[in-house]
Image (tube, rainbow, N blue to C red):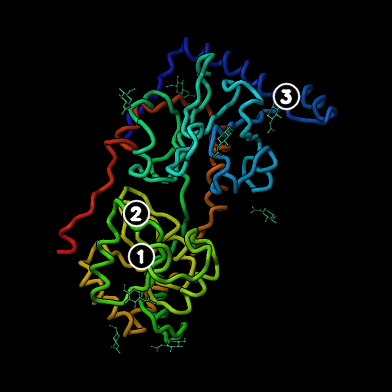
Amino acid sequence: MFGLTIIKNSPVKIVILLIAVGSLVMTNVFFHFALSSNPTQSTTVQLRPQPNPIKSILLWNGSGRKEIRAFGLGQEAFINQNCTFTQCYMTDNRSEHPIEHYDAVVVVFNDEFTWEDELRMPQFKNGRNPNQRLVFCTQEAPVALKAYYNMTALSNLFNWTMTYRTNADIPFIYGRITPKAGALKPEDIARFRVRARRPGGPLRNKTVAWMVSHCDTHSQRETYVKELSKYIDVDIYGGCGNLSCALDVLHHSDPQCYDMLESNYKFYLSFENALCPDYVTEKFFKIMGHDILPVVYGGADYAKHAPAHSFIDAGKFKPKELAAYLKLLDANDTLYNEYFWWKDHYRVEFSVNDMSRHGFCDLCQKLHEPVDYKSYKELVSEWGDGNKCKPFDPSIIS
Ligand SMILES: *[C@@H]1O[C@H](CO)[C@@H](O)[C@H](O)[C@H]1NC(C)=O
Ligand SMILES: *[C@@H]1O[C@H](CO)[C@@H](O)[C@H](O)[C@H]1NC(C)=O
Ligand SMILES: *[C@@H]1O[C@H](CO)[C@@H](O)[C@H](O)[C@H]1NC(C)=O
Ligand SMILES: *[C@@H]1O[C@H](CO)[C@@H](O)[C@H](O)[C@H]1NC(C)=O
Ligand SMILES: *[C@@H]1O[C@H](CO)[C@@H](O)[C@H](O)[C@H]1NC(C)=O
Ligand SMILES: *[C@@H]1O[C@H](CO)[C@@H](O)[C@H](O)[C@H]1NC(C)=O
Ligand SMILES: *[C@@H]1O[C@H](CO)[C@@H](O)[C@H](O)[C@H]1NC(C)=O
Ligand SMILES: CC(=O)N[C@H]1CO[C@H](CO)[C@@H](O)[C@@H]1O
């Protein structure tokens, strides 16, 4: 858990707060006019101040990254993305207003930033605006960030987290698998599983595929796969193997690659590069969106992210046992097909657009909730040296 400080409001503080909030509401209303280029609209709003003034968000950095860029900027982005709350305005232009002006400042943390400017934290020359939220935003695992940031130096700075963690203030997750029509009852699930056993489905004569570009990882998935491939054929695509399916394979974004996988292979290795709590990425969700059975290896509790009996957890097997189990499923369509029982009853979201839309729509909504003071005393215990990522367990291959 993060060191969490909720500032309790004494009655006197509440009065001060109300005055502060009141004046801020006015400032925001006028800021709203400033944004509007339509003079008649400004006049109307001036006479009838809106109950929900526009909340302003500064994207401090990272606006060039695809998972951020996918959302867009301005207020139009919130409207075009069909957010429930559209009364927000987002910019990545640090010169538009002094930093303390914004209701939220989003700082993106990433391990692919190369310029010093991308890694630099905002400076508050005029002091912090006590009502402003500084948002720690990342989709990376702590072990990836460690080399780039000194998390110890980021104490008492951030108010909210926007990450893939289940305890994030604003969920920024790689995908979601949701029932199409309400929760399913256990008896429905049992019935669907029996029905899924029927023969059919594509005839595929290859077993295991893996697309991978990072060959030396914290999770040492490569060690597991090396052992696994002694017992079953594993076709490796991308930078770490000798197969390739499209130029774009490194970015896992070419749809043709997925069509190729789907028509040739029965299993796909959705192996994460780090074994960290809740860290389950598009490597899993994207495969769940296709007709191929994922074998997972990661630090998340996958049962929280996907229906029962919809994936195979490599962490529960030694490589040799896993190979034997995959061969059993390969030889028995009844058993293999059962893993697809859920397909007609759930919707899978896995795209960068979905991730971005949910994240920023939720951020806007949360900015409209009553002010609840919160700040992270430290980030080290979750995102720095104290992170809960597990090292590779060598006993799994012995
Ligand atoms: C928003 O809704 C409109 C109308 O239903 C639809 O055409 C559009 O694709 C939606 N946009 C997104 C990003 O979902
Ligand atoms: C950023 O905002 C400043 C001040 O409004 C403006 O002069 C400048 O042109 C903007 N930059 C971009 C890239 O839009
Ligand atoms: C990280 O920041 C802390 C606190 O500001 C400082 O004491 C420490 O020396 C820094 N560590 C490194 C490696 O720079
Ligand atoms: C696998 O199927 C492909 C066509 O789908 C076929 O060309 C190939 O010969 C088959 N390989 C084996 C070993 O059966
Ligand atoms: C790819 O590598 C594997 C083992 O490393 C080898 O058995 C296989 O023949 C290679 N395939 C090609 C097409 O070079
Ligand atoms: C496949 O597995 C099912 C369920 O365990 C079993 O009833 C069936 O006999 C198996 N089929 C073959 C061909 O082994
Ligand atoms: C955000 O965190 C800062 C630093 O801890 C704090 O001073 C400020 O009151 C917090 N603001 C909100 C709205 O929680
Ligand atoms: C990667 C990225 O988007 N970096 C941006 C961080 O924010 C500054 C200020 O808006 C931009 O100049 C960088 O390009």
Residue type, numbered disc 1: Ala
**Image spot of residue 148 (x, y percent):** 38, 37
Separation of residues labelled 2 and 1 (CA atoms) = 24 Å
Between disc 3 and disc 2, whose residue precedes? 3
- Residue assigned mark 3: 49
Q: Please tell me whether residue 54 is drawn above or below residue 277 in the rendered image.
A: above
Q: Quadrant of the N terminus?
A: top left
Name, please, the residue furthest toward the top.
12
Mark 2 is surrounded, within 10 Å at the Cα level, by few (under 14), some (14 to 19) or many (20 or more) other residues, namely many
Between disc 2 and disc 1, whose residue precedes? 2
**Image spot of residue 267 (x, y percent):** 37, 73
- Residue assigned mark 2: 273
Q: Which residue shows up at 45% across the image and 60% down it?
A: 285
Between disc 3 and disc 1, whose residue precedes? 3
- Residue assigned mark 1: 308
Separation of residues labelled 3 and 1 (CA atoms) = 50 Å
Q: Which residue shows up at 65% across the image and 40% down it?
A: 73
Mark 1 is surrounded, within 10 Å at the Cα level, by few (under 14), some (14 to 19) or many (20 or more) other residues, namely few
Secondary structure at badge 1 equals: loop
Separation of residues labelled 3 and 2 (CA atoms) = 50 Å
Q: Nearer the viewer, residue 162 or 96?
A: 96
Residue type, numbered disc 3: Pro
